[in-house]
Image (spheres, rainbow, N blue to C red):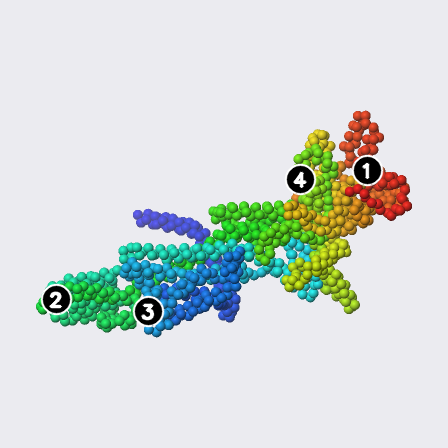
Amino acid sequence: HSSQIRNENDTRSTVEKVLDACAGVLLCPFVWMYDAFLHDCLIGLKAFAIMAIRTIKTQSQPFLNGQAPFAMSIRITAVNFLVLCSTWYMFIDQVRLAFFPAGADRALSIVSLVVWIVLVLELVFEVFIRPDGYHSLLTSEKAYAPNTVRFINSFHLMMESLALILFIPDFWCILASNHSCSARLKFSYLNASMLTVLGPGRSDVFLGWAYLALVRLRVFGLVRHWKKMWINNTFVNMKWKTTGGNSKNFFKGVFTPHYYQNRKVVPTNPGPNRADQFVERGAEVHKFKEATLVNASNIGTALTVTNSHRALMIVCCITGLFPLLAALDTHGGSNRVAQELTSQLQEVNLALGGDSDAESECEYFVSTALAWTVGVTRGQSKPRTSDTQIYLLYAYVEPSHCEEIFPEFDGDITQALCRQRNNLYDVNDTSVETNEEELDRICEVWANVTLETTDSEIAALADIRTGAIKEYSLSVVGNHTNTSGTFDVTYRVVTKFNHTFSVAQSATSSFLLQMALLVCVLGGLTVLRRDAGVLVLGPLRRMLKIVARYAKNPLSTVRSSDKGDDDDSDDDSQDEGMSPENRLGGYETEQLVNAVSKITDLLRKCWGVAGADIISTNLATQEGTLTEVFNPTVPGKSVYALFGFAAINGFDHTLRQLGGDVMILINDVAAVLHGEVFRWGFGNSGQCNKNLGAAFLMVYRIGLVREVVQRLEQATAVVFENSTTKTSTKKSGVRRRLANRSSKMSSTSSDAHSSFGSSRLSTGSRSSRRKSSNRTNQSKAAMSLSLQSLPGIQVFTDRAVIGMLKSFAGIYRDNKLLSWKNDFRLGAGVGAFSVNMIFGMDAGWAVEGAVGSEYKIDATYLSPHVNMAARMMTACKQYGVSILLSQGVQELMSGSAQSKLRHLDTVTVKGSSLKQKIYTYDARHKGVDFFLFSRSDEQADLDAERYNTNVWNADQDLRAMRQHVTEDFEQEFNRGRNAYLAGDWPKAVKHLEAADEIMVENVMDQGYIQNELNELQCRINDGEDARLAEEELRDETGDGPSRRLIAFMEGEGGNAPDNWKGFRPLTSK
């Protein structure tokens, strides 16, 4: 048996060992995890400790020395002081009654007097600083301008003056020595509190609430300061942002239409402070722009002012007048506890009656009176705090009952109670705890109060305010019976109660209500201002910005930021990212924004570059207000530009066949032409000005004549001022040349805004002569300046010419234009029609402006260079080419571009005696598949932005349209042209015929006219004269200029006339 037990124990121990081993294995991962976690925590704590120590070391020095970020500075300004005084004035009388003891009344009254004087002086100064004619401003259109609204108006002046007058009783004790600062004056806040709490009648409660309603008017001062602060920070004291110019932007500005962005003219004579002048000019322009928006934001200030007035009146009525409804209740809803207690004591006094000397009745009366006193006093026998006020101050009963039986009871109940303090325990429940110290304090007051003691003496004894003491007196004449008989006696009860607690509760409630009033008014106005900004002012300001932007640059396009973003610093217009619920009501204003954008965009598209100044002049502001009279016929301005004409060839036939549908065709052409001109114009300078039937006028605007001249002078001044010369002679020579040029061109920079005094002294004839002289000088400057001297003009001109060449390629690539081949009216259903365009260009000056009257105006350009561009376009028909450029354009192009042009002839056009060379870029569309080289708009825009002269050799469109031109052709043509100009016409005819033959062979060999050859074979098979058909095809495929020159020379007899001068006139328009 023992061995069996031993075996069982061994087995159990083995099992336990196995279980322990398994438990150990299972717990190992957890132990490892615990160790790893503990290790990580220790490492983390160590790192944290190290970081904390480093932080303490690095921050200790700035903390101890008061350096950033631990530096603190307090700035107190006059405005801060006035706001502080207004806050004191708004709350002090309520805070005084709610939280301060009676001993602090005089000190607080002194401070209130100082605050009152400061606020009165502020009102007086506010009235005196109002500008002359202030009341006239209130009836004008500037009534709600920020500079007008920031002054105090009559509404605020009246309300604040009334509130200040009602504040006088709170410090009257300082001015009148016979009044206590804790007394209850007739129009004091203490009196109003007592009336609202105690009444006793409805009229008393009404008067109390009426005064408290007038106390709410004190919020007007703080609201006025808040409104003035907002106006000053938003409008009056706005920080103007200035942007200065630099040389890079300066040179770029020569060839971009920045005139409308910076209308202020740069000084003609740059001096050592030229950079400062640029900064000042930018600041003035930006300030003028911001001032326009500030003065246009009258609606914002109007909403703020009117909303503040209405909100103040509404909230003041709610918090001040609605409580007046309490006066409709019985007794005005006043607290009648003290009065009812007095009535109870009087009933006890009257109940004695009869034989008052009876011992039983005397005991009843005395015990009842003492019980009443104890009941009134019981609540204050257990003090809530150490400074608990005594509620019952005095109680007196007349006549004096039972004086013979109870000699200590002489009618003064409060004193009698203190003489018989044990009765407090006998009359009432002994379980009620009584504070002996509190009773000692109460009896100390009661023992010194008699019927003759004044309220001020009682207040001094009880350390309370005199005005918080209220006396209740009830008297009745009745019969009194004693041992001597029955006689008439007056039954009278006099009690005095301390209502400090009720007044403090009322003042606390009023303080909280006044605080809530201030928070609601300022918070409500802030919310209303924000909502008005989001729903009204934001869209209106965006509309004004659109108008202002178009006034400064009518050629700018609509930007998304104009429709949805107000980059102005003001938070009134930040409505982005708002939910649809919060944007309720914004639909109408957004529609207005879209309408204004469409109208301005329509003006830009209708009037183009030439009408830009009309838009700018009529939309611009004058002294912060928009012009009231529309004057489209503004004076013109001289500008430099490249002028191009493009026309649809054979338009008369197209017009007759299509009728009204011809407008669709023209718009399809315009879509291609306008897009390429705008894309390739440098700095968005390319604009299509107008459409003249089948012709389009294109303008690449360089800038105003006077601005270009001045910028060129300043560029010259920058170069020579910054360069170091070796001799003083060279320096003086540079200065002399600059001075002469500056004096020559100074008249062009004369501003139309001359001083008022000088304009009054000038006579009409002198003013007329001055204007005539200015125009003459500008014309001379325009004709004398060589555009080749402008930096960057080669890139500007190259891109303009490429814009025309890209338009040529786009015409034969656009799907809409290609679809017109299938129109039966034009091609008889066999695709015989194609849109063909011809182009002409010249460079120079022109007068930009409006032509017409008040009934109809047309924005245009007047210049011989515009006429020259038109002549170049029409001359394309005479020479059989698609593009003709004047010598003025060719001279402005880069060398790479000039190498691709072909000098055709030297001519004078009709209406001009100027002899000049004419050039063409050999562009042929037959046999060229331009659709193979099509690019997306983004890629095309990127090509234009990255322009360099290598484009003339690498661009696929430019290479494809000129691939029929070979070197041997150019050599033969140049020999023939040179011989023609030299007067050796027979030799010229020989070379030109050879050049024409080379062209025909190139076209035929390269398969450009395979379709035409197939059509020719069909015509011959149909019996048509083969020679005539072949001659017609040769005319279409040969070189047009060579054939035209040969025809001209043969028409003149084949030999040059004796008076041949190397050019010929083009008599046809």
Provide the residue designation for mark 3: 182
Provide the residue designation for mark 1: 1038
Residue at 31 percent of width and 62 percent of height? 195
Residue 385 in view = no
Q: Earlier in the sequence, mark 3 or mark 4?
A: 3
Where disc 1 sits, the SS reads loop
Residue 757 in view = yes
Provide the residue designation for mark 2: 487
Q: Earlier in the sequence, mark 4 or mark 1?
A: 4
Q: Position of residue 283 (x, y in %)?
A: 61, 60
Where disc 2 sits, the SS reads strand
Q: CA distance from mark 3 to mark 2?
A: 44 Å
Residue at 13 percent of width and 68 percent of height? 402
**Front residue of this view, candidates 705 and 946:** 705
Q: Is residue 982 above or below residue 75?
A: above
- Residue type at numbered disc 3: Ser
Q: Nearer the viewer, mark 3 or mark 2?
A: 2
Crowding at label 2, few (<14), some or many (≥20) Cα neighbours within 10 Å? few
Where disc 4 sits, the SS reads helix
- Residue type at numbered disc 1: Gly
The quarter of the picture where the C terminus appears is top right
Provide the residue designation for mark 4: 667
Q: Is residue 177 above or below residue 1047?
A: below
Q: Earlier in the sequence, mark 3 or mark 2?
A: 3
Q: Are marks 1 and 2 in contact (CB under 8 Å)?
A: no
Q: Earlier in the sequence, mark 2 or mark 4?
A: 2
Q: Is residue 768 above or below residue 902?
A: below
